[in-house]
Amino acid sequence: MSNKTINALRVMVIVVLNLFVISAVLAFSRSASVDTLSKVGSRGTEVRAIQQELKDRSLYTGAVDGVFGSLTKNAVVKFQKQKGLAADGVAGPQTLRALGVSVGTAPSATQANINLLARIISAESRAEVYLGQVAVGAVILNRIEHPSFPDTLSGVIYQPGAFTAVTDGQMQQPVASSCYRAAKDALNGQDPSGGAIYYYNPKKTSNKWIRSRPVIKRIGDHVFCS
C-alpha cells in the first residue's frame, strides 16, 4: 500500500472520528436542553416556588429549601392527581401552569437593558455609594427570577406600586453616569445585596411590613432584605 493511500486513509479516519464526536456533543446538548424540568434532584428558585405553592395548598409539609426531594415529589403527585394531570411527580409545563408558577431569567447586558436599569438605579439611588447602586440593580434582577414578581426587567420596574420613583418623576431625571456602570455590573452578575429582593431607607420609611423583612445587609443608607 502506497504512502499516499495510507495518508488518505488516515485523513478519512480523522474526519469520521471528528464527525462522530460532533454528533455526540450535539445529541448531548439537545438532551440537556430538554431535560430542564423540575424533578427529584433539581434545585433552585423554581423548586422553591413549587414547594411554596404546594405548601399553600396544604399538600407539602417540608421546608421551602429549593431542593426537590421525595417529599416534594409526593406533593407534586398529589397535586397532579387533583388536577387530572399525569401523576409522574415531575413539574413539567402543564403542572407549573396549573400551580401558577412562573419564574423569569436574568436578562443579558444589552445596551437597552443597561439604559433601562441605569435609569431606575439612578432614580432610586443616585446619591448612594457605588456598591449600593449595584445592589439596587441586583435587587431588581433578583425579582425577575423570583416567583412573586414579574418575569421581565420592564415588568419588575413598572410593576404598579413597586417603585415610587416611577410615579413621582424621578425616572425622568438625568441619569447619573455611575449608574450606567452599576447597571452593567449588575447585569453581568454582581450582587452586593446578597440575593435581596427588597431594600429600604430606614430614615425615610416607617412601613412596618418592610421593616419586618429579614435583613441581609446594609449598604450606605439602604437596608437590603429578603
Image (spheres, helix red, strand yellow):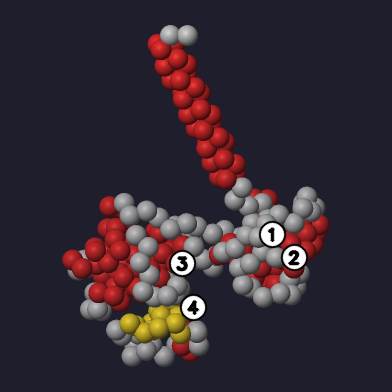
The answer to which of marks 4 and 1 sits earlier in the sequence is 1
Q: Amino acid at mark 4?
A: Ser
Residue at 55% from the left image edge and 64% from the top image edge: 45
Q: Residues within 10 Å of mark 3 (few under 14, many from 20)?
A: many
- In whole angstroms, how far apart are the C-alphas of marks 2 and 4? 27 Å
Q: Which residue is mark 4?
A: 226
Q: Nearer the viewer, mark 2 or mark 3?
A: 2
Vertical placement of 206 versus 129: above or below? below
Q: Is there any visible trace of residue 50 in the rendered image?
A: no
Mark 2 vs 1: CB contact within 8 A: yes
- In whole angstroms, how far apart are the C-alphas of marks 3 and 4? 10 Å
Q: Position of residue 177 (x, y in %)?
A: 18, 66
- In whole angstroms, how far apart are the C-alphas of marks 4 and 1? 26 Å
Which mark, residue 70?
2
Mark 1 vs 3: CB contact within 8 A: no
Q: Amino acid at mark 1?
A: Val
Vertical placement of 24 versus 72: above or below? above
In what element is the residue under mark 3? Answer: helix
Q: Nearer the viewer, mark 1 or mark 3?
A: 1
Q: In the picture provided, is 15 more to the left or to the right than 164?
A: right
In what element is the residue under mark 1? Answer: loop
Q: Which residue is mark 3?
A: 143
Q: Position of residue 191 (x, y in %)?
A: 38, 70
Residue at 40% from the left image edge and 55% from the top image edge: 107
Q: Which residue is mark 1?
A: 40
